[in-house]
Amino acid sequence: MSEQTLAGPIDDQQELERGFSRYQARLVALLALVQFTVILDFIIMSPLGAIIMPALGITAGQFGIAVSAYAFSAGISGVLAAGFADRFDRKRLLVFFYIGFATGTALCALAPNYHLLLLGRIVTGLFGGVVGSIVLAIVTDLFPLHLRGRVMGFVQTAFAASQVLGIPVGLFLSNHWNWHVAFGALVGLALATIAAVLMLMEPVNGHLRLKQDRNAFRHLIATVGQPRYTLAFAVTTLLATGGFMLMPFSSAYTVHNLGIDIVHLPTIYLVSGMFSIFTGPLVGRASDRFGKFPTFVFGSAISVVMVTIYTHLGHVTLTTAIIVNVLMFVGIFSRMIPSQALISAIPEPSQRGSFSAVSASLQQLSGGLGSVLAAAIIAQNADGSLQHFDRLGYIVVATSILSLMAMYFVQRQVAKQTGEPVV
């Protein structure tokens, strides 16, 4: 069976073979902007913690609850939305959840106390957690498999751009005014993005012509219970669990264990982020040209080596810290981009939305659990340095190897479905 692409308004095969059409290029830019705002809203909480905690008079534990509330509410909403994800025009669904995301962010911007901030994070997670899955479903519907690596490469640069552009700007606004302004600016950008989506994106409704189960609960159960989706879900879970174990503690580890002055932290994030902006599209092109699984193997090998080195470092120079972080990001992108492109070929066209929603839910929940597990493993010395950080490295390496083994069978499954080699 060949891969079915519900191309809709861009169903011009000759144009697809040459590369992106004008509409496709505009669409990729729009989706990348959507991802940028959602990812920035999620990751900006951590660097703003030092400003928010004294401003609201809350403890580190309360702040941690506010941060994790997003992940867990996003995980729950993904499951709830999965049953309805294939019953509506994906453009309308994107606008609906994105408006909810903007509303939650506005609550954060206006929050005068901890309780309203916590409510804002929950609302933002409930809506924002589904946006990424809708973006993935749109990409899968409108782009054939041989172009998806390139598309994912551009869309995922949103993560790097949020580090390079978003976090420094957010910190600047917070330091010169207050933390409410940073969220307010994000709301303004989100409103502009909503207007752009409404004006520039065509309807994405080709999947509505396919036969579907009209009962939302049965549609969800049919997706979750599909045996051939199990491996893909397992890969998503393993990748998220490993990634989220190191990220929350990376800044403390860099300062206290690697001996890097805290004033140089922005430099590390800036350089690694700028490098990732260029790396993402290159990895996407490589996965389309040389194969998604070989690119994933390359990324896994880089990740295993660099995570092992990173979690065993002592005091190092700033240059060494930057090089190690850059190479780790190369490994991360070389796994994330081809895995998403390859896994997107697994679901049936009538189940793409629900499949993506369940995957996003697993990603959020496993990421949140990974952070909790990491916090239980490490300990902090009186001088601020972290103990047992190397144990986190061993777990991340183990999840990387397991995900590589599972991905081998995923790519064989995709090759069998499409009837041709996966490229």
Image (cartoon, rainbow, N blue to C red):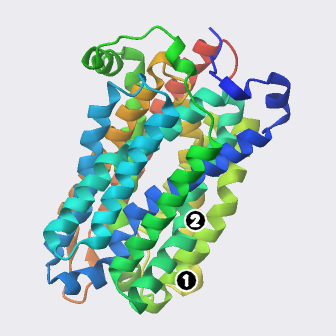
Say few, some or many: other residues with alpha carbon within 10 Å of mark 1 (under 14 / 14 to 19 / 20 or more).
some
In the image, is 248 to the left or to the right of 170? left
Residue 80 is drawn in which quadrant? top left
Q: Residue at x 61, y 50 (%)?
A: 30
Residue toward you, 401 or 265: 265
Q: Secondary structure at mark 2?
A: helix
Looking at the picture, how far across and down is residue 117, in whole percent?
22, 68
Q: CA distance from mark 2 to mark 1?
A: 14 Å
Give the labeled residue for mark 2: 161
Look at the picture and state if 363 lies above or below 249.
above
Crowd band around label 2 with a 10 angstrom C-alpha radius: few (<14), some (14–19), many (20+): many
Amino acid identity at mark 1: Thr
In this view, 30 is above or below 17: below
Q: Quadrant of the N terminus?
A: top right
Q: Residue at x 34, y 80 (%)?
A: 179
Residue behind mark 1: 267
Counting from the top left corner in percent of width and height, residue 148 is at: 65, 36
Left or right: where 59 falls relative to 215: left
Q: Give whichever of 407, 32 is nearer the camera.
A: 32
* Amino acid of disc 2: Ala
Decide if residue 399 is in sight here.
no
Q: Secondary structure at mark 1?
A: helix
* Number of marks drawn: 2
